[in-house]
Image (spheres, rainbow, N blue to C red):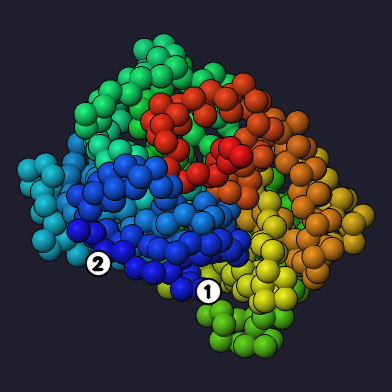
């Protein structure tokens, strides 16, 4: 019998990093896939809905229960085995394995006890001259691999390596009725716009919706559908509404030696101008991140209160770009970058460089201090304003629309008199705009402006949610992105896969009242 516990008021099971707060009385805590299957059979037989939870690092409320019980996968973590195929090595992981844990296993080559998923794979990976790594980098290293797959998470390194979807080899999925199946990329694809597959005692079959998605723009706005689609892509980005991911295999690549840099600029316009040229003239960038003057001011104020909160010196005033370049040929690359930044009122003397993993981690910590500070600030408001939650954009647009979108962000927020910071993935035209709220009045005003931002991004050919998914907070952006007909088609698939509607109700699809 699976373990189930009472949830107490104020429990971490009732929220995530968005600081949206829900309600629930019980949490089921499986230790294995068999227990997940048992849980789903019990809840499905009674028609009782569940919300799936893991590390609760999401920012859209996807794991926040709204009165129903929670199924937390927190006890299902760790690496299982290593294999190798024609593409590369891959590693099999339980769903609540964090990216931090995965990175440690690979960096330290902690492969003792892991299965050979293909003959000799563990010994072969152990003896490679360089360590391997999982290149997807969603910034939050405390997030789980299962959660990353469920939201098709991405982050800074999407600039070079793509999203989670590009690195998933296979998954195992438990369905609402307790059935289970293993899905490997390439083994089950749609015939035109129709796809079908067995799982347990059931055979699922449905039409694939048709809606346009620009593959050049980052997009995590719900599941991805297309003619001839691979079955695995039904579950990557579907946030648990079709099934619970209980195992993941992801590909690995050799770790590339890099030089990390934070380049400082006198103002935002200079940094953004330099970013365009660096992106077009500098080859081999791992990522390209932006921190506006407000972000740097926020970090400086946090470090003024506690100098040890970030493991780096206090940054100078102004704005900044953060990027990694290959160590090989880095002097020539820096020569090119030096010429670019001089054109924008800066120089290589106005920068921090480092070539060790510790250097990278310190610089990453500085960049991550921006959203972390805002998460903590919003959490501090909850006692006085229980309904408040974080309001930060997650929109991406095509190259030709980046300037217009940035101008729209600033003009609307300035007109409204709202404080904000802008930071993040400028290399993918995907900066985050975090609105710093002071009152419920500002919160309501900011929500209305956020709707304008979403509509503007879509009108420019962009996406409403580039990497965080939709969760509960952003369900209204699904019809905005794809139209009501597509939403109805997705709901039809949900009815086929989960007839009683017990898996993550109100996530991605607005709850039926």
Is 383 on the left-hand or right-hand side of 144? right
Q: Which mark is residue 399?
A: none
CA–CA distance in space, label 2 to label 1: 37 Å
Point 84% across, 56% down: residue: 445
Q: Is residue 444 above or below residue 89?
A: below
Q: Is residue 81 above or below residue 359?
A: above
Point 80% across, 57% down: residue: 444
Residue sitting nearer the eye, 8 or 462:
8
Q: Which residue is mark 1?
A: 10
Whether residue 211 is visible, yes or no, is yes
Within 10 angstroms of label 1, few (less than 14), some, or many (20 or more) residues? few
Mark 2 or mark 1, which has the lower sequence index? 1
Is 146 on the left-hand or right-hand side of 510? left
Point 27% across, 54% down: residue: 94
Measuring from the top left, give residue 280's x and y in whole percent.
63, 41
Q: Which residue is mark 2?
A: 108
Which quarter of the image is occupied by the C terminus? top right
Of all residues, the one furthest to the top in this rendering is 192
> Regarding mark 1 in the picture, which secondary structure is present there?
loop
> Regarding mark 2 in the picture, which secondary structure is present there?
helix
Is 413 on the left-hand or right-hand side of 260? right
């Amino acid at each position: 019998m699976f373990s189930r516990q009472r949830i107490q008021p104020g429990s971490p099971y009732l929220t995530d990093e968005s600081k949206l707060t829900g309600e629930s009385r019980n949490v089921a805590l499986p230790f294995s896939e068999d227990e997940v299957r048992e849980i789903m059979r019990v809840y499905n037989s009674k028609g009782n809905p569940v919300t799936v939870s893991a590390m609760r690092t999401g920012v859209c409320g996807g794991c926040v229960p709204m009165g129903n019980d929670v199924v937390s996968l927190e006890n299902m973590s760790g690496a299982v085995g290593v294999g190798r195929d024609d593409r590369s090595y891959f590693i099999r992981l339980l769903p609540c394995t964090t990216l931090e844990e995965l990175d440690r296993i690979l960096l330290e080559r902690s492969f003792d006890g892991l299965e050979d998923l293909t003959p000799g794979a563990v010994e072969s990976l152990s003896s490679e001259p360089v360590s391997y790594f999982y290149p997807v980098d969603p910034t939050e290293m405390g997030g789980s691999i299962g959660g990353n797959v469920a939201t098709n998470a991405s982050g800074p390194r999407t600039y070079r390596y793509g999203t989670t979807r590009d690195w998933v080899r296979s998954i195992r999925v438990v369905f609402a009725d307790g059935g289970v199946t293993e899905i490997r990329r390439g083994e089950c694809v749609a015939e035109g716009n129709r796809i079908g597959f067995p799982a347990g005692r059931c055979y699922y079959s449905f039409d694939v919706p048709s809606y346009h998605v620009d593959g050049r723009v980052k997009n995590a706005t719900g599941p991805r559908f297309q003619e001839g689609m691979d079955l695995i892509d039904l579950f990557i980005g579907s946030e648990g509404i079709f099934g619970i991911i209980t195992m993941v295999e992801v590909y690995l690549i050799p770790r590339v030696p890099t030089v990390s840099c934070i380049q400082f600029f006198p103002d935002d316009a200079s940094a953004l101008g330099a970013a365009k040229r660096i992106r077009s003239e500098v080859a081999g960038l791992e990522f390209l991140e932006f921190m506006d003057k407000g972000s740097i001011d926020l970090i400086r104020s946090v470090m003024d209160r506690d100098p040890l909160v970030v493991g780096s010196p206090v940054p100078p005033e102004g704005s900044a770009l953060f990027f990694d370049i290959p160590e090989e040929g880095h002097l020539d690359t820096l020569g090119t970058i030096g010429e670019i930044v001089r054109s924008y009122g800066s120089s290589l003397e106005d920068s921090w460089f480092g070539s060790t993993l510790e250097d990278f981690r310190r610089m990453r910590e500085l960049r991550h201090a921006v959203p972390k500070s805002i998460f903590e600030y919003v959490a501090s408001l909850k006692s006085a304003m229980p309904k408040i939650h974080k309001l930060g954009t997650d929109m991406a647009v095509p190259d030709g629309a980046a300037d217009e979108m940035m101008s729209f962000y600033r003009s609307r927020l300035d007109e409204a008199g709202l404080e904000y910071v802008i930071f993040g993935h400028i290399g993918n035209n995907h900066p985050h705009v975090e609105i710093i709220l002071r009152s419920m009045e500002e919160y309501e005003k900011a929500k209305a402006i956020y709707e304008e931002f979403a509509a503007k991004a879509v009108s420019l050919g962009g996406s409403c949610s580039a990497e965080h998914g939709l969760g509960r907070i952003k369900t209204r952006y699904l019809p905005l992105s794809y139209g009501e007909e597509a939403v109805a088609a997705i709901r039809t698939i949900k009815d086929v896969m989960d007839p009683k509607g017990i898996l993550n109700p109100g996530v991605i699809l607005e709850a039926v009242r």
